[in-house]
Amino acid sequence: MAQTSEASHGLNFNRAASRCALSWLAGAFAVAIAVFALFPQLDIATSTLFGGASGFPLRPSPLWEDVRQFFIIVTNGSAVLLLGYWLVLRLRNPPQHGRSAFCQIAGFGALAYLIVPGVLVNGMIKPLWARARPYNVDMFGGTFGFTSPFELGGQCHGSCSFVSGETSALFTCATVAALFFAPMLAAKWRMPALWVIWGMAVFGSLLRIAVGAHFLSDVVFSAILSSAMVLALALRLSVDPKERKNQAMPAKITAL
C-alpha cells in the first residue's frame, strides 16, 4: 500500500506546463536584457534606495545577517539532506528497488543544486564576469567603478556580484519544491506552500540588494536563469514513452 501511494505521487510533472513556464522565463530574460540595456542606471537607482556614499546601513546589522544565514542553512541544508537521502536509498536497495519516487526527487534536487548554483553560477559566471559588489563601488564608499551586467568587470578576484549565488540557491530550491514537493501536499495546502516557497526566495534575494551585496540585475538574472535551468534539466531527464504521444501526460524522471 505504501509503494502504491508513493508511486501515485511519483516524480511526476506536466511537461507541457513546464515548457510553457520555460517559454515565459525566456521571454522574461529577453525583457530583462532590454530593460537593463536601455536603463543602465537602474542598478544604481535601486541600490541608492538602501545606501549612499557612506555605505549601506543594513549591512552591519546582526539581525539581517542572521536572516541571511538562515536562508543559507535552508538551501545548503536541503541540498545536503537530499543528497544524503538519495545515497542511502541507492546504497541500501538493489537498483530495481532503489529508484522510488522520493529517491528520484532527492537525486534530482541534489543534482540541480550542484549544477545550477554550484557549477554554473559560482563556478563559471561569477569568475567570468568579475563584477564588483555595490558596497565595493566608489559611489557607495568603495574603490571600484560601476559596471553594467553586460560588461566583464575584471575588478573582482574572489566573491563577485554577477550573478547572485544566494539568489540562485533560493530559486533553484524553490523551483524544485514547486515542481515536485508542493504537488504532494493536500490541495488546500498547495497554494499557501507555494506562497511561502516563492516568498522566501524573493525576500532573500531582495535582502541581498538591501545590504549592498548585489545589484538589482544580479538577482533578476540569477532568479530567471536558475529557475529556467531547473525546468530545462527536469525536461531533459524525464523519460516516459507515453508522453511522446500525449504532451499533456505527466512525465517521470527515471534517470536517477
Image (cartoon, grey):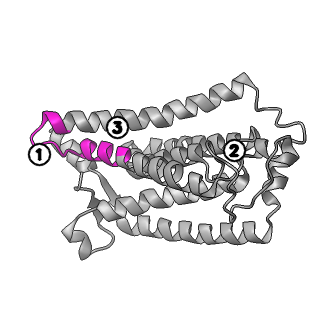
At a point 63% along the width and 46% down the height, the residue shown is 157
- Which badge, 1 or 2, comes first in the chain's sequence? 1
Horizontal side of 115 relative to 145 (left or right) equals: left
- Percent from the top left, x then y, of residue 171? 53, 49
Per the image, label 1 sits on a secondary structure element best described as loop
Q: Amino acid type of disc 1?
A: Pro
At a point 74% along the width and 66% down the height, the residue shown is 36
- Percent from the top left, x then y, of residue 234? 36, 59
Query: Which mark is drawn over residue 82?
Result: 3
Query: Which mark is drawn over residue 78?
Result: none
Residue on which the image places disc 2 = 206
User: Which SS does the magenta portion mostly show?
Assistant: helix
Residue 58 location, quadrant: top right
Residue on which the image places disc 1 = 95
Is 47 in front, or is 193? 47
- Percent from the top left, x then y, of residue 207? 69, 39
